[in-house]
Amino acid sequence: MNVRIAQTEYRNSGGADRVTTALARCFDAPIVTDIDRDAAVPSDIDTVRTTDSLLSRALARTPIPSEVTDAFVWSRVEALHDADVIIGSGLAPGWYIPMDRQVSIQYIHATPRAQTDRFQEEIDSTAGLAYALGGRVLYTQRPTPDRYVVNSELTERRLNVHWGVDSDRISVVYPPVAVDEFSPETDRTAVVPEEEFYLVLSRLHHLKRIDEVVEAFTDLDETLVVAGDGPDRERLERLAAGSSNVVFAGRVSESDKRALMSHARALLMNTRSENFGIVPIEAMAAGTPVLGVDDGFTRVQISPGDNGYVYERGVEHIKAAVAEFSERGVSWTPEEISAFADRFGVEAFRRNMRRVVDDAVERAEITGDWE
């Protein structure tokens, strides 16, 4: 069975890239992408380019919406013509129009947010409305794959509501989290404070809503370590000015990340409408409870009182969650919290994806009933 994994702009830097990498290794398949080989593709994975990169770069500089340029670039990709099974990671490869003999599987990390679940919050102009509604109409013209795969039950619901896809055509396969790399017994490193601390580990972007966490801790007698970097860092540092208990660690190495996860009292997850959320599972794999906002898939990952607490959005609610956790703790041991995270591991991902592909191939087989 000749399998190809397709993804646009593979950079080996985010959750979608982790899925693509795991898919390529699971099926011993190359990644078909429109980014050059030097874009940090692991050395054990082959790549094939979709089209002339000059064309991709030229289209990216135009004011044409990405949905239109993706449809143009991906509808016909010769590198996919000899594939028996095509697994697209993300939205762009879904524009490929498969041949009868090809089985198409699309792993959806998120629907277009401004056109779907964030429409009411983000669209506040006539131009924005035209873009969002135009995109919704355009997506009705996409080829329908043999199987949709999504990263969470929340993303499944968005496909139900916004794309009209029935759940019997969707499989939920959680992203591959490297849970085996985390442990409650991880040694300290220099970045880990001597005193007890709470942790935020994230790209510092306004949608992560880290400002609410920082503001909460400026009024608490608890240490907060903010690990990560991004466009919102300067604003967050200004917000914490004068508060010695809020420490910005910047971008940390993988070893420092594991140490911080293991030694933190709890991780705070305040991201807005998270599709899945890899960082909370990494924290749990390290045996660390999670205090998470009652929003997105974060609220599903937490069993309140067992492996963390869920709170309503807002600074005062964050303070209350920290106080409740500080007083009551959680019922699960670090080892039990770590065991809970195993269901989101790489091996579980591989096993479930093989099952999905085998089932899709079997269902696509056309036979005649001559009895």
Image (cartoon, rainbow, N blue to C red):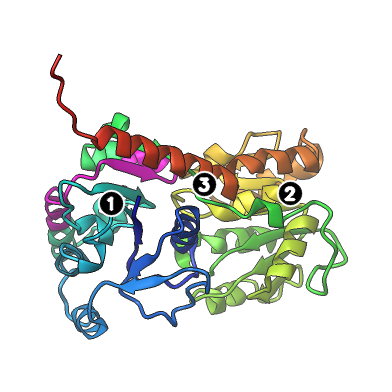
Q: Quadrant of the C terminus?
A: top left
- The kind of residue tagged 3 is Arg
Tell me if residue 270 is in the magenta stretch: no
Outermost residue toward the right in this view: 194
Residue 3 sits in quarter: bottom left
Q: Which mark is residue 288?
A: 2
- Lateral position of residue 231 relative to residue 73, left or right: right
Query: Gap between marks 2 and 3, in whole Å?
Result: 25 Å
> Image point 21% across, 61% down: which residue?
81
Dot 2: what SS?
loop
Helix, strand or loop under label 3: helix
Distance between the Cα atoms at labels 1 and 2? 43 Å
First in sequence: mark 1 or mark 3? 1
Residue holding disc 3: 350
Decide if residue 278 is on the left or right side of residue 275.
right
Residue drawn 25% across the image and 67% down it: 79
